[in-house]
Image (tube, rainbow, N blue to C red):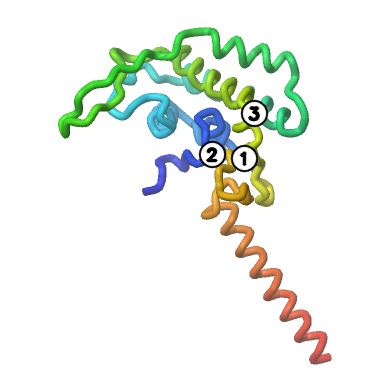
Amino acid sequence: MAAPHGLRFDCGRICLDLVATTSDPPAERLTGPEHLTAWLVGAGVVPHGAPLEGVDGHWVARFRALRELLRRVVHDELRGRAADTDLVLLNTAAAAAHPPAVRAVRAEDGSLARTFPGPPDCAGLLAEVARDAVGLLTDTVARGQLRQCAGANCTLVYLDTSRGRRRRWCSSEVCGNRERVARHRRRTTGRETAGRDGAG
């Protein structure tokens, strides 16, 4: 089943999935509290069924600000190194609050499920995403798996955990399919051009 609001959860890390809530050309997927709530649950930042109250436009603005910071840091690290000022901002976000505590509770089917003891606050959830980014960028194995999508006009970054590290696109169904369609068109156009030249 497709994720709601065009959200994607296939980049391999929570912080990268947050960056994927916008893309080039600009496509904003965190347009309001409903979208942010769906992202928080879909990305696993907030467990399904956990209380989530108070999400409003202020939360959306704060998550967008963190997203832009993460986008700069991740892309700059892929190209060389992030600015020290951005690293300070990332570390500040990671240390600004404690991520919400999780509890194991018994579900109706007898399995154990994650939940929060009460509604989380915005700063704690921001800190959890920022800490995920710190963990990613300081893990040499994970950093070695970072890739930028090879799709035309796509700037998304993902973790390549495929066998042989040969994954080229953020999504085979999205950018990969576009590339296959474009390749087919180029071949078809090339054959038509060759046919016309030969007929002349």
Q: Is residue 62 visible?
A: yes
Residue 99 shown left or right of residue 171 in the figure: left
Residue tagged 2: 11
Disc count in the image?
Answer: 3
* Secondary element at tag 2: loop
Q: Tell me the residue at 30%/21% (across/down).
A: 115
**What amino acid does circle 3 point to?**
Thr
Residue at 50% x, 30% y is 14
Judge depth for marks 2 and 1 and give the one in front: 2
Give the CA separation, mark 2 to mark 1.
8 Å
The label nearer to you, 3 versus 1, is: 3
Check if mark 2's residue and mark 1's residue have beta carbons within 8 Å.
yes
Q: Is residue 193 above or below residue 57?
A: below
Amino acid type, mark 2: Cys
Distance from disc 3 to disc 2, alpha carbons, whole Å, reads: 17 Å
Disc nearer the start of the sequence (3/2): 2
Q: Nearer the viewer, residue 110 or 53?
A: 110
Instruction: Name the residue: 54% across, 39% down.
Output: 11
The C terminus is located in which quarter? bottom right
Camera-side mark, 3 or 2? 3
Which mark is first along the chain, 1 or 2? 2
The residue furthest bottom is: 199
Q: Secondary structure at mark 3?
A: helix
Where is residue 148 shown, x and y percent of the image? 66, 41
* Residue annotated with mark 1: 156
Which residue is under mark 3? 140
Q: Are marks 3 and 1 in contact (CB under 8 Å)?
A: no
Q: Is residue 70 above or below residue 26?
A: above
